[in-house]
Image (cartoon, helix red, strand yellow):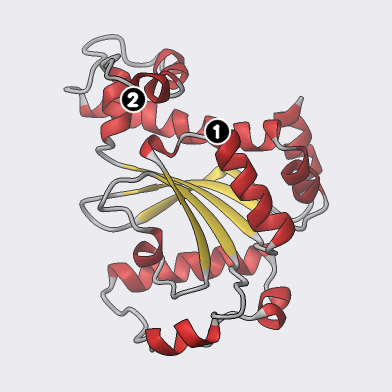
Amino acid sequence: MKTLNKALQAKITPKQALELLKAGNTRFVDNLRINRNLLQMVNETSDGQWPMAAIVSCMDSRTSAELIFDQGLGDIFSIRLAGAVVSDNVLGSLEYACKVAGSKFIVVLGHTKCGAIKGACDAVELGNLTALLNKIAPAVFAEKTITGNRNSHNGAFVEAVNNIHVERSVQAIVEQSNILRDMLQKGEIGIIGAIYDVETGVVSFMDHTLILEEKKEAVEAIAG
């Protein structure tokens, strides 16, 4: 597996970047990960980085994007914080990843049994965590199908909220970043939401959130 450089990155399309991530997760699940010379990759990335994708994911210790997608040093940007909450800092990081560093694809990666989602479901208040969980709260209120046991003890409710939160995070990125929205409209990048299963290692991609290859109608529908 070659270390990504500027020339290789330039040849990768957004669609190919997504397929590379999917293939990497399949290898991870099948325990057929690529045997990489990490020291060589350190040397080959010492003068720069040309990642193909940017992953916005949770800080959960079980959800390292590099491992889940079987990627090496310099292959992906990994933006991690509790609940994979989208903020100005996340948007700025994504704009750098795509507009400046040339990444072709964005994945918003939630995961099952997420502590931040559970905390939001229970309206937990704890220091600075309170403000973060408040950003997940709209997904809790948006979940209308489950009427009983709307708390963290109801696994179905937690996962329903989780799915809504990921969907809304994709939407927030498109709505709140003029730079990324323009790149999506031009087909320069793609974006999708996904959920990682902490029990199986499988990443389930939410195809209805996919924006790829100049789907201007989808971008305009989200951005209003």
Q: Give left or right: position of 126 versus 45.
A: left
- Measuring 24% from the left and 10% from the top, which residue is drawn there? 148
Amino acid found under the numbered disc labelled 2: Leu
Q: Which image quadrant: the C terminus? A: top right
Q: Give left or right: position of 180 versus 172.
A: right
Q: Name the residue nearer the viewer: 48 or 64.
A: 48
Residue 115 in sight: yes
Instruction: Point out the tag, 2 or 1, that comes first from the N-terminus.
Output: 1
**Label 2: how many residues lie within 10 Å, few (<14), some (14-19) or many (20+)?**
some
- Measuring 26% from the left and 33% from the top, which residue is drawn there? 115
221 lies above or below 80? above
142 lies above or below 116? above
Mark number for residue 87? 1
- Measuring 78% from the left and 33% from the top, which residue is drawn there? 220
Q: Which residue is mark 2?
A: 129
Q: Name the residue nearer the viewer: 203 or 3.
A: 3
Could you say which quadrant of the image residue 129 lies in? top left
Tell me where residue 164 appears, x and y as whole percent: 46, 28
Mark number for residue 70? none
Q: Name the residue nearer the viewer: 82 or 220.
A: 82
Q: Secondary structure at mark 2?
A: helix
**Label 1: how many residues lie within 10 Å, few (<14), some (14-19) or many (20+)?**
some
Amino acid found under the numbered disc labelled 1: Ser
Tell me where residue 87 appears, x and y as whole percent: 55, 33
73 lies above or below 126? below
Tell me the distance, in whole angstroms, between the alpha carbons under discs 2 and 1: 14 Å
Q: Secondary structure at mark 1?
A: loop
- Measuring 64% from the left and 43% from the top, which residue is drawn there? 92
Q: Give left or right: position of 201 versus 53.
A: left
Tell me where residue 212 appears, x and y as whole percent: 69, 53
